[in-house]
Amino acid sequence: MPQMVWSAGADGRNDYFNRQWHEFTGISRDTSRILNVRNLLHPKDVDRVTAAWTHSLVSGEPFEIGCRLRHRSGEYWWTLTRARPERNASGRIVRWFGTCTDVHRRVQQQRMVRESDALNRSILDSTPDCIMMLNLEGDILFVNQGGMRVLSIPDDTSLLGTPWIDLLTPSAAEEGQGALDIARGGGRARFTVMATTAEGMESWWDIIVAPVVGDDSQPSSLVVISRDITHQKVSEEQALWAANHDVLTGLPNRAFFQLRLDQYMKHADKADSGFGLLLLDVDNFKRVNDTLGHDTGDALLRTIAARLKLATRAEDLVVRLGGDEFAVVVAGASDADKIEAATKSILLKLGEPCSGTGRLLECLASIGASIYRPGGMDKVELLKQADIALYAAKDGGRATFRIFEPAMRKEMQRRLSMLSVAREALRRNRIVPFYQPKINLQTGRLAGFEALLRWRHPGRGIQTPDTMAAAFQDASLALEISDRMIALAIKDVQGWIRAGVPFGHVAINAAAAEMKRGDFAERLLERLATAKVPTRCFQVEVTETVFLGEGADYVEHALRTLSAAGVRICLDDFGTGYASLSHLKKFPVDIIKIDRSFLRDLHHNEDNDAIVRTVINLGKGLGIKVVAEGIETPAQSAYLRKHGCEYGQGFLFGAAVPRKDVPTMVAAMSARADRLKSTSLLASSLKIEVGGEGSGIIAERGAPPLCLRPSTAAFARQGKAARLRRARLSR
Ligand code: C2E
Ligand code: CA
Ligand code: CA
């Protein structure tokens, strides 16, 4: 027999073991005689086995128990131990015959299966994924607890037997059906679907459908594992969104713009159409940011972004390039008219009152446009052209729109070179003020000087401000230039005061860009105080452009501060540009300067004649002094004097001269005025020309020129009156 066989007496004592038993236990025949089998049992089985054996001995019922018996290897092996009693004729038990079957391997396998079952169950129940078993038809056989949670069902019974495909949205059903087919054929399918949760939220699922292969190596059922990847999907989408969008306005960003521009160009080439590219720069944005704070600046940008979206069509593209720059692609606009129409509606929308930020803000932008025509140009050129047009637009004031024209490129280069000229002149300390005299037309006496910017070119000598005119409009350069001019003018004035030169006053020109800086007046007054220069020695000339646009309130503050401190304010180029009488009422203007263009053909041009006389009367009426600039002929001078113009300035009296010639000029003019007074000659016959540096030439109509010798500097040092007398004598 393959089994272990044993027998025992009616009392239960073992009296026989077969060979298999000895082989299993490794116990010899001799030892087995004195052995208590209990000692071979697993300690945990002893009590159970003893109880059952005792029960059988007493009751005579067959004995059968699974227990662990010590194998010769020292391990306990599972056995199935059975015994039956042998009875005599009277029915009394005389002996027990038993077997012991080695079931160790089987028990172990069963246990492993049980454990593995438990493991599977625990995995199935603890995973957050939804796991379902389907039959080959696709009906649900099983749903794990994770699935029940996901599907919000208390138990799986409600789902059992229903087709899995019914759980998918109609749009995903087709993909689901395909996956089932693949799995039925033994393959593994994977796809992503979007579903809507009971709360109406979007959720995303990664779904795997795989076969469960049966004994015949054929799919016997299917398993579907669905994983919620909404979180991952959302963060993926967020990352993608963030890489391509501007957080503040929600508009696409520059990176996205670059990509899309390529697409627009490709499409235009293919469709043989074009599109317009608009670059927008918010007007005065830096001011808003600096003066009203970044929150207001941000709000303004958001408003502009929203309005741009409203003013454009769905097929157009609106992006924020960064800072206060935006771009709009006007799809399909291949000619100037279409682009202009699109821009008009944008400017109109932007121009609406903007009060969302708690205060009324101007929400304007300058726009430069370029046109893409199929096969036309590359992206860099397209952007460059729009940029050049934007530059030209910004030059034209606020809310201006320009389409690129080739001439703009030259103009921009010219302006850029002016900026670099200004920078270079500043860096190399080449900027100096020259001083042009202003005359009291009625008395012929010197009234003061206007400081005009000059710079020394190393090869070409003294240059006039038109070579760097663009710099006066550049906020930072204008400031630097003005700082330099003011510092030098104050220094010169200081020197003349010390030397006792009666120069009257010095007027400096202030550009709009510098006036609109918050502390212009305070800085100027502080410097005058530090240099101990009386404020009445200083005038500030501004043109009416400073009153226009945003920042006018700062200009008003600056002018009032200066005026209150005794610095007189002169309104330059009066009559040109934006002349408005309200400016004269609103701002503390002491002097107006009739622009020199009105002095042309005074006698023959009735308009100019009328304007000049009107301005003179206006000044009289308002108590504002009037200066006529650009007087070149004695006739002009006589005309102005006759009509009561108080002051004059122009080449007739002298062009601007360097600092060192000023004392000479002052002295010469004063002497001349004295003489004219005594000879009652008219001031109009006085002409002072200053040639090369260091030489002053005073000429009187009809008289030979007066040369001032020796050097003007030495002349100045010698004291005015005495020297002048000597000069007169020497003539
Ligand atoms: P502006 O303030 O109107 O200055 C008068 C200009 O007219 C000066 O030109 C002067 O040389 C010129 N001028 C004077 N008398 C006559 C005349 O009888 N006939 C003619 N045809 N012209 C005359 P300049 O020096 O070339 O300056 C041009 C402009 O540059 C100035 O016009 C002013 O707007 C600006 N500028 C000059 N210096 C400064 C400065 O320091 N700061 C600022 N912001 N602007 C300045
Ligand atoms: Ca001026
Ligand atoms: Ca002027």
Image: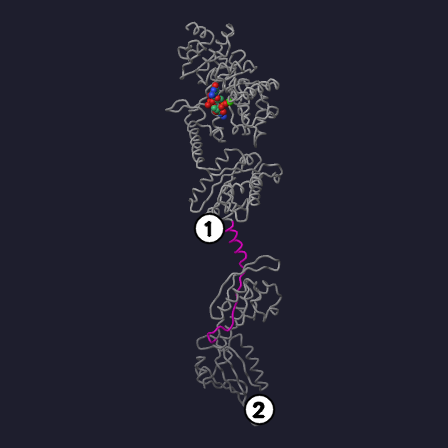
Q: 10 or 229: which is nearer to us?
A: 229
Label 2 sits on what residue type?
Answer: Arg
- Residue 407 rendering spot, x and y as whole percentages: 44, 35
Say which mark, if any, is on residue 451.
none
Residue 446 inside the magenta-drawn segment: no
In the picture, which quadrant includes the C terminus? top left
Q: Residues within 10 Å of mark 2 (few under 14, many from 20)?
A: few
Q: Is residue 486 visible?
A: no
In the picture, which quadrant includes the N terminus? bottom left
- Residue 555 rendering spot, x and y as whole percentages: 57, 28
Instruction: State the residue at coordinates (39%, 10%).
Output: 710
Tell me which segment is drawn in magenta. Answer: 215-241
Residue 218 inside the magenta-drawn segment: yes
Q: Residues within 10 Å of mark 1 (few under 14, many from 20)?
A: few
Q: Which residue is mark 2?
A: 92
Instruction: State the residue at coordinates (58%, 83%).
Output: 55
Q: 117 or 62: which is nearer to us?
A: 117
Q: Which residue is mark 1?
A: 271
Callout 2–callout 1 Cβ contact below 8 Å? no
- Residue 711 rendering spot, x and y as whole percentages: 40, 12
Judge whether 83 appears above or below 314 on screen.
Answer: below
Label 1 sits on what residue type?
Answer: Ala
Query: Is the CB–ligand 1 distance for label 2 below 8 Å?
Result: no
- Residue 568 rendering spot, x and y as whole percentages: 56, 20
Judge whether 526 appears above or below 685 on screen.
Answer: below
- What is the secondary structure assignment of the residue under circle 1? helix
